[in-house]
Image (cartoon, rainbow, N blue to C red):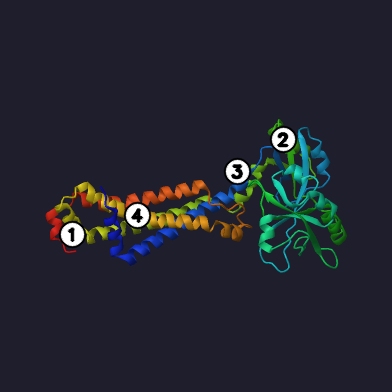
Amino acid sequence: MVSFKLVRRYLGKHKVRSILTIGSLVVALFLLCMLRSLVVALDAGVRGAKRDRLVVQSAVSLFVDLPQSYQSKIAAVEGIETICKWQWFGGRHPTEEAFFAQFAVDMSELPKLYPEIAIVEGSFADVAAERRGCVVGRTLAKTFNWQLGQTVPLLGTIFPGPPGDGWQFTIKAIYEPTSSAVDGNTLFFHWDYFEETVESTMGMTPGTGTYFLRTAPDADQVAIAGAVEQLFDNGPQRVTCSTEAEFQAQFVSMVGNVPFFVAAIGGGVLIAIVLACINTMLMAFREQLHDAGILKAVGFTDGSVAGLMLAESLLLCGLGGFGGIALAKLSEPGLRAALGSMFPGYEVTGETLLLASALTLAVGLVAGVVPALRARALRVVEALRSVE
């Protein structure tokens, strides 16, 4: 039977060392949870993608626009229910430095394409009634303290703004995404306003960055994608048609092999903390050698003494590990707000918490097993001869 009173006493004998070790574990498990959550956030769009959505883009590059004349031809393909133009705007707020996405879209088609855009303030009807109306994510509105009806000015970095006041958008609706496929840090505005302004300021009709499609529930995705691509085999601009999941995966691949990079960092942190905990427990064993001999002399079994060492390691690692896990979960809202533009959908998931808990237990066992085995094999005479 392990005496937890003795375990607490041993940990309290060297308070500074115990506090430093616990602090190291808190930092290590917090970093592990955060790093894994970043990877989860990168894959959120892929996981939340729907099978009935396809994306059409230039076969040359995502940065090459497609002609608007393609829309009617694509819409005529059997099995396509909704088609929506989608153009990256790339503006910036004149006073705020934080980055966020803006898209010109067919506003009437957006709710059909993405029912996951749940309006919580205002309505799509309000947006439709206002030429400069826009809909913004609740997370974005909270970040900048925007309110319904407020005017949002943006400086065009790709598309010059209208003469005078420049690009001006009025918030007519605020949405809350119900799926990880939709980012809550996005501003959507009318394609008509975008096109009219570009024509008047740049003297040209803008192209479309992508066409987002929604297909019938029983439609053959492969056949539809093939039919769309075949339409434009002879130009003027060849296209590729992929599932939403494949399209989202492109963005993950653009930043390199992030999962491997994060796993390498996390693995290094884990190895370092395991070695530190093993060193701490070996030092504790040497200091408690005399005590272990006395315990055995008064009747404690080999297993009980070994259990004390193992329990000490588990308690030490548990305090630090679960402290780091709690810190990761408590800091989730703040980190989501800070990282939302680059890592939308940041969340410390239950799976991450379970993995971190298992790692905490594993570190405690690995760090304590060697001292426990040595304590079990310790001879009383040898221990009593040692100097505490």
Q: Amino acid at mark 2?
A: Gly
Q: Amino acid at mark 3?
A: Arg
Among the two numbered marks 3 and 1 on one chain, the one whose residue lies closer to the N terminus:
3
Badge 2: residue crowd in 10 Å (few <14, some 14–19, many ≥20): few
Residue at 75% from the left image edge and 34% from the top image edge: 227
User: Label 3: which residue?
Assistant: 47
User: Label 1: which residue?
Assistant: 290
Q: Amino acid at mark 4?
A: Leu
* Image mark count: 4
Among the two numbered marks 1 and 4 on one chain, the one whose residue lies closer to the N terminus:
1
The dot on residue 315 is 4
Q: Residue 380 location in percent, x, y?
A: 14, 53
User: Label 2: which residue?
Assistant: 226
Q: Residue 22 location in percent, x, y?
A: 38, 60
Left or right of 103, for residue 287: left
Among the two numbered marks 3 and 2 on one chain, the one whose residue lies closer to the N terminus:
3
Of labels 2 and 4, the one closer to you: 4
Among the two numbered marks 3 and 4 on one chain, the one whose residue lies closer to the N terminus:
3
Of labels 3 and 2, the one closer to you: 3
Q: Are marks 3 and 4 in contact (CB under 8 Å)?
A: no
Left or right of 358, for residue 386: left
Label 4 secondary element: helix
Q: Are marks 1 and 2 in contact (CB under 8 Å)?
A: no
The dot on residue 43 is none
Label 3 secondary element: helix
Q: Residue 246 location in percent, x, y?
A: 64, 43
Label 2 secondary element: helix
Of labels 3 and 4, the one closer to you: 4
